[in-house]
Amino acid sequence: MSESKKATMQIRDNGSILVKGDVELLDAEGNVYETKPAFSLCRCGHSNNKPFCDGTHKKTGFESQPRAEG
Ligand code: FES
């Protein structure tokens, strides 16, 4: 029996949200995006390929380094 592993979403400093694991990404109408086992979501709002990160955050100087408490 294979052990199921929790999917994770990791906030990257000054960048995207890295999503790993068995998840479905849906648009507002419930349509499923085709994704790889790991993909990055835009957090800065400047990607030309939303909802995915296209690296534009590096050009715009996006800064955000939140930390979870506890
Ligand atoms: S976080 Fe990378 S383009 Fe927005």
Image (tube, rainbow, N blue to C red):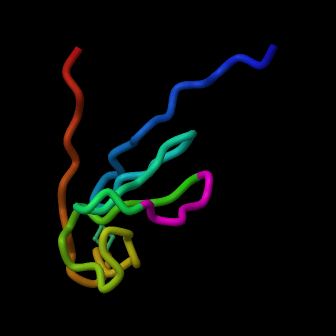
| Residue 57 percent coordinates (x, y) | 28, 74
The residue under the point 44% across, 60% down is: 32
Q: Quadrant of the N terminus?
A: top right
Residue at point 28% right, 84% down? 59
Is 20 on the left-hand or right-hand side of 18? Answer: right
Image quarter of residue 50: bottom left
**Quadrant that contains the C terminus:** top left
The one nearer the camera, 4 or 45, is 4
Q: Say if 32 sits above or below 67 in the image.
A: below
User: Across the whole image, how many numbered discs are drawn on residues?
Assistant: 0
Q: Give the range drawn in magenta.
A: 32-37
With respect to residue 4, does 34 lie above or below? below
Q: Image quadrant of residue 69?
A: top left
Q: What type of secondary structure mainly makes up the magenta span?
A: loop
Q: Is residue 34 left or right of residue 25?
A: right
Q: Residue at x 29, y 79 (%)?
A: 47
Residue 40 percent coordinates (x, y): 43, 60
Residue at 46%, 48% in the rendered image: 24
User: Residue 28: x and y, percent?
Assistant: 22, 61
Q: Which of 59 and 10 is in front in this view?
A: 10
The answer to which of 63 and 44 lies nearer the viewer is: 44
Residue situated in front as seen by the camera: 58 or 54: 54
Does residue 48 show up magenta in the picture? no
Ligand 1's quadrant: bottom left
Taking the image as shown, residue 32 lies to the left or right of residue 44, namely right
